[in-house]
């Protein structure tokens, strides 16, 4: 149902609700008292509908979509590693990197993977993706997937959405609220069943 049709339906619902309440009260209450009660009930219903229909961004945490240089990662204190150690960690599958656009070498590190609790959860999934190119690995992480209720694997693993995502559906919030190990298992199973995502890329 589109937003216009939804608003029209809501107005009809409120009007019908008011008529039903007034009719059912009937002669049980004097006119003034009945009108007051109907007004209170109608206002409460209208406010409830408005609250349910208004999209909200209730994310207390979100994932950055930026890519960082090794110097940025170190300067931000995200790992406590030196550049050489960070590179070795990426090579061993503790983190992952992508090659900067337009270049044939160099490393950039997608910032989302340094958000807790990702560093403790990501290695087994990266191991499943070890034979893929860096660009394919990144596409896997940031591409929304039907199997994950239109969440990206990165969002599922972290338990929070990308900072450019709009309002979440209640079912998506439920998935993001699962315990870390359950989220990790869902992402791991998804990584095992397909080499790369083909849905809409979020970032």
Image: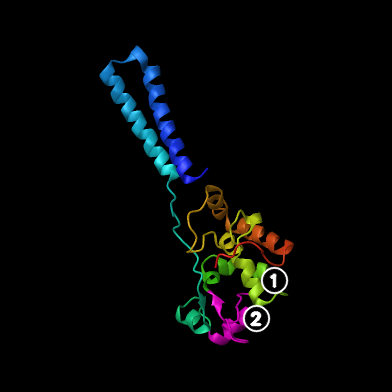
In this rendering, position of residue 2 left or right of residue 91:
left
Q: Residues within 10 Å of mark 2 (few under 14, many from 20)?
A: few
Residue at the spot x=63%, y=87% of the render? Answer: 104
Percent position of residue 84, x then y: 57, 87
Camera-side residue of 22 and 72? 22
In this rendering, position of residue 168 left or right of residue 18:
right
Camera-side residue of 83 and 31? 31
Camera-side residue of 15 and 133? 15
Percent position of residue 165, x then y: 50, 60
Quick check: is 87 in the magenta stretch? yes
Q: In which quarter of the view is residue 126 placed?
A: bottom right
Q: Residues within 10 Å of mark 1 (few under 14, many from 20)?
A: some
Instruction: Spot the residue most to the top.
Output: 27
Percent position of residue 49, x then y: 42, 39
Q: Are marks 2 and 1 in contact (CB under 8 Å)?
A: no
Q: Identify the magenta region.
A: 82-110
Disc 2/disc 1 C-alpha distance (Å)? 11 Å
Tell me if residue 104 comes above or below residue 182 in the rendering: below
Residue at the spot x=46%, y=78% of the render? Answer: 77
> How many labels were placed on the picture?
2
Percent position of residue 69, x then y: 52, 82
In this rendering, position of residue 96 left or right of residue 132:
left
Colour mode?
A: rainbow
Per the image, label 1 sits on a secondary structure element best described as helix
Quick check: is 28 in the magenta stretch? no
Q: In which quarter of the view is residue 136 placed?
A: bottom right
The label on residue 91 is 2
Per the image, label 2 sits on a secondary structure element best described as helix
Q: Magenta residues: mostly which secondary structure? A: loop
Q: Mark 1 = which residue?
A: 127
């Amino acid at each position: 149902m589109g937003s216009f049709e939804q608003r029209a339906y809501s107005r009809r619902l409120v009007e019908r609700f008011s008529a039903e309440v007034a009719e059912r009260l009937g002669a049980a209450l004097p006119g003034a008292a009945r009108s007051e009660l109907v007004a209170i009930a109608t206002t409460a219903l209208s406010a409830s509908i408005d609250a349910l229909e208004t999209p909200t961004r209730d994310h207390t945490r979100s994932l950055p979509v930026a890519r960082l240089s090794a110097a940025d990662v170190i300067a931000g204190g995200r790992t406590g590693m030196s550049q050489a150690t960070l590179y070795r960690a990426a090579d061993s599958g503790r983190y992952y990197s992508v090659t900067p656009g337009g270049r044939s070498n160099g490393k950039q590190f997608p910032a989302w993977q340094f958000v807790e609790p990702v560093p403790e959860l990501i290695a087994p999934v990266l191991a499943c993706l070890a034979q893929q190119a860096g660009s394919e690995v990144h596409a896997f992480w940031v591409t929304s997937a039907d199997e994950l209720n239109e969440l990206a694997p990165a969002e599922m693993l972290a338990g929070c959405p990308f900072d450019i995502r709009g309002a979440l559906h209640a079912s998506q919030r439920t998935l993001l609220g699962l315990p870390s190990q359950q989220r990790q298992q869902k992402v791991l199973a998804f990584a095992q069943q397909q080499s790369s995502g083909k849905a809409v890329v979020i970032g």
